[in-house]
Image (cartoon, rainbow, N blue to C red):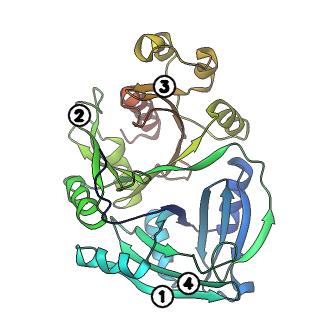
Amino acid sequence: MTHEDTFPIRKVDHVRHYVNNARQAAFFYQHTFGFHITGYYGLETGSKDECGYVLEQNDLKLVFSAPLRPGHPMAGLIAQHGDFVQDICFEVDDVDWAYKAALERGAQGSRAPFDLSDENGTVRMASIKIYGDVVHTLMNRDNFKGHFLPGFREMNEPGDPIGLIEIDHCVGNVELGQMNVWVKWYEDVLGFKNLISFDDNDISTEFTSLMSKVMASGNGRVKFPINEPAPGKKKSQIDEYLEFFGGAGVQHVAMRTDDIIHTVSRLQARGIKFLSVPRSYYDILTDRVGEIDEDINVLAELGILVDRDDEGYLLQIFTKPITDRPTLFYEIIHRKGAKSFGKGNFKALFESIEREQELRGTL
C-alpha cells in the first residue's frame, strides 16, 4: 500500500563533494569508477572563488567542488571533515513551494530560492540543512536547455564506464541519540516513511553494534538509511566515523549496477580496495539465500555478498574508505528483485570492518 506523497521528489539529481583538489578528485573518479567528466566551472568561466567538475555515468551524477581562495566558507569545513559529501540534491517540481513547505514543517533554510541563468535558460534552486554540514538542494531545470547548470562549461573527457547506473541510496551517520531526531525530521519535513529498522540485535558483533533506520520518500525512489552508534565493548565503526569526520555526515553512497561481477572486477583491476569476508561465508551461502544465478566461486573470489528478501535477492560489496580518513566509502549494489539492504550480511560485514579498525588501531 502506498501512502500519500506530501513532498514530491523526482529523484536524487546529483551528489556534491567538497574537496581540497577538485581536478585530482575528478581524475581519480574518472580513471577508477569510469565516470565521464562532462562539465567544469572555475576561473575561466567567471567563478572567482571556487571551481568544480561534473562527472556522469548513465543516470549517476557526482560533482566535485574546491575552494580557490583562502577564507572560502568551505575551506574550514574541508579542514574539519576532510573531503566530504556536502549536498544531496533533489530534483523537484516546484522549488519555491518545496522550500516554503520544508521551512513550515521545521526545516532550517541554508539558501532561499534563487535563479541561475545563462543563454540556455534558467535553473531555480534553494537549499535546506540536514545533519552535520550537509544540505539538500532543491532544484528544477525544466526551463533550462543546457547541459548541467548555468555557469558550467561543457566538457568531453570520457572515462571507461563500468556499468554504474544510478544512486541507490545514501547513508548518514549521526551522533548517539540523534537517529530518531532525524527520522522524525524526514517524516515531518519531507514526508518520508520509515521503511526498515535495525537495532543492535540485528547489527552487532561480539565487540560493536549500531542502530539504523531506513527512510524512503513518498514515491519510494529516494532512500536514506540513518545510523547511530549503540553501546558495545569496543568503538564501533560509527564512533570511528564521528571521531575522524568531526561530527555527523554522509557515511557512504550506494551506486547501482546491473552486472556487479563486471563492475567489481573492473574496479579491482583499477586498484579499488574492498572489504573482504572469510571463505566460510560462501560455504553456507546457498543454505541461507537459496539458488542464485551467479557462480559462487566467482563471488567468493571478488568478495561479493548476497542476501535475499521476500521479493528477490541482492548482491553488494563495500569499498574500503576512499579518502585518507576512515570516513567516506562506496557500496556497489545489484538488485535482482530485492528491495532491502542486506540484513543477512551485517554480521560478516561488521566483522570485516572491525578487522580494518584493528589495523588502524581504532577498534
Quadrant placement of the C terminus: top left
Q: Which mark is residue 233?
A: 2
Between disc 2 and disc 1, whose residue precedes? 1
Task: Please state if 11 lies on the left or on the right of 58 as rendered.
Answer: left
Tag 1 secondary structure: strand
For disc 4, the marked residue is 70
* Image coords of residue 315 (percent x, y): 52, 30
Between disc 2 and disc 4, whose residue precedes? 4
Q: Which mark is residue 306?
A: 3
Give the Cα separation between the discs numbered 2 and 1.
49 Å
Asked whether residue 113 is in view, the answer is yes
For disc 1, the marked residue is 114
* Image coords of residue 102 (percent x, y): 30, 74
The correct choice, above or below, for 226 with respect to 276 in the image is below
Give the Cα separation between the discs numbered 2 and 4.
43 Å
Q: Nearer the viewer, residue 181 or 69?
A: 181
Task: Please state if 78 lies on the left or on the right of 162 as rendered.
Answer: left
Give the Cα separation between the discs numbered 3 and 2.
28 Å
Q: Nearer the viewer, mark 3 or mark 1?
A: 1
Amino acid type assigned to the residue bearing label 2 in the image:
Lys
Tag 2 secondary structure: loop
